[in-house]
């Protein structure tokens, strides 16, 4: 797949990173997981080294190995690889971007530097400088991660628009702003730019409503478990088939409760537990300080998967 041909759109699951009992990366389990998700018809790309993969707990060497491994597996499916750039060092961000391009990745998902939580929204030049290092090292298409307002790491709308104007390789925004009014305004203003920028929603807790506002796709960790349902929902919304979209959303809603009930920090831990229950992972190890859900919560996940009609025989296999 030619890198220049990829434009971020459609359904882009963010994959998990399996670990063994000693917290080491389980590469064979990772390869199986990639093939499971990439094998879903309609998946446009897979994002690696993101929140779902516990990137905060991965060493740089592990992140680089994940790039190599992912490209080896996804090439056979014709599915693009989006590499997360998650670091508070702009210099390191440039090195990650350059490595991703050298390895053959198709796009980057650029996170805001965590240090900006201390008031970076008041210093838009910090965001500009960070993107300057990334774009100076790579000309891959960029998906810019717009964090929730509550995180204190989101870009004010004016800053977001200016970044998209200044850096032509920003082709999409992964939007988790968390506010419906601002979400719709961002979608509209990004589309109206001289060089339109797409919106990929990651509002997985209200996905149908978000997609209906005109998003060009979705990028979500829940796709590690329900990529097939996400594809079906996206296609129904694009086709204007509200009745069908509502029916698919009824299937998805129990997984919203399974993954996204408070505390939100446990969402990817729960996705791992779901894949163990579904026979797709052997174990659900997370790296500290993340903690394994207790037996009561695992039972809740089991019950909600059953309510969604997701079983070991049907996972990744939604039928139209």
Image (spheres, grey):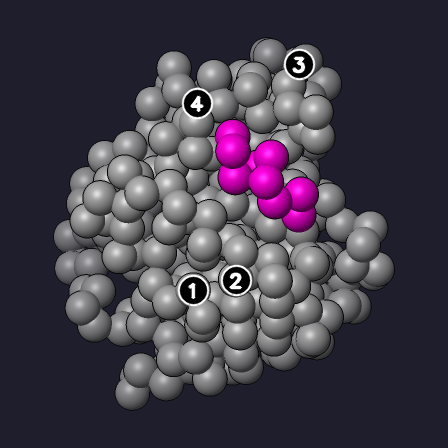
Question: What distance separates the C-alpha of mark 1 from that of mark 4?
Answer: 27 Å
Point 65% across, 63% down: residue = 138
Marks 1 and 3 close (CB-CB < 8 Å):
no
Task: State yes or no: residue 162 in magenta.
Answer: yes
Per the rendering, the mark at residue 183 is: 4
Point 21% across, 65% down: residue = 290
Q: Which of the two residues, 237 or 174, is positioned nearer the viewer here? A: 174
Q: Does dot 2 land on a helix, a strand or a loop?
A: helix
Q: Residues within 10 Å of mark 3 (few under 14, many from 20)?
A: few
Point 70% across, 25% down: residue = 194
Q: Does dot 1 land on a helix, a strand or a loop?
A: helix
Task: State yes or no: residue 170 in magenta.
Answer: no
Marks 1 and 4 close (CB-CB < 8 Å):
no
Q: Which residue is mark 1?
A: 90
Q: Nearer the viewer, mark 1 or mark 4?
A: 1
Q: Is residue 214 above or below residue 267?
A: above
Q: What is the quadrant of the N terminus in the image?
A: bottom right
Q: Residues within 10 Å of mark 4 (few under 14, many from 20)?
A: some
Compare marks 4 and 3 and give the one earlier in the sequence: 4
């Amino acid at each position: 797949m030619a890198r220049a041909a990829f434009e971020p759109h459609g359904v882009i699951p963010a994959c998990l990173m399996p670990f063994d009992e000693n917290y080491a990366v389980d590469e064979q389990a990772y390869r199986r997981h990639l093939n499971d998700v990439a094998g879903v018809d309609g998946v446009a790309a897979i994002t690696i080294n993101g929140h779902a993969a516990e990137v905060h707990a991965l060493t740089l060497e592990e992140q680089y190995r994940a790039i190599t491994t992912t490209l080896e597996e996804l090439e056979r499916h014709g599915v693009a690889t989006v590499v997360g750039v998650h670091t508070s060092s702009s210099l390191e961000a440039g090195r990650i971007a350059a490595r991703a391009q050298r390895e053959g990745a198709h796009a980057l998902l650029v996170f805001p530097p965590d240090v900006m939580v201390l008031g970076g929204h008041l210093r838009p030049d910090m965001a500009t400088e960070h993107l300057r290092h990334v774009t100076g090292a790579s000309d891959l298409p960029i998906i810019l991660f717009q964090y929730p307002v509550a995180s204190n790491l989101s870009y004010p709308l004016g800053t977001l628009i200016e970044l998209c104007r200044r850096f032509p390789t920003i082709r999409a925004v992964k939007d988790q702003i968390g506010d419906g009014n601002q979400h719709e305004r961002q979608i509209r203003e990004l589309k109206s730019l001289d060089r339109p920028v797409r919106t990929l929603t990651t509002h997985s807790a209200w996905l149908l409503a978000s997609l209906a506002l005109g998003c060009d796709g979705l990028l979500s960790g829940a796709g590690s478990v329900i990529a097939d349902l996400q594809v079906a929902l996206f296609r129904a919304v694009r086709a204007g088939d509200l009745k069908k979209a509502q029916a698919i959303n009824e299937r998805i809603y129990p997984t919203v409760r399974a993954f996204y009930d408070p505390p939100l920090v446990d969402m990817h831990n729960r996705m791992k537990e779901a894949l163990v229950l579904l026979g797709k992972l052997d174990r659900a190890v997370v790296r500290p300080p993340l903690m394994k859900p207790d037996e009561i919560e695992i039972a809740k996940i089991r019950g909600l998967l059953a309510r969604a009609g997701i079983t070991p025989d049907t996972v990744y296999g939604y039928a139209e």
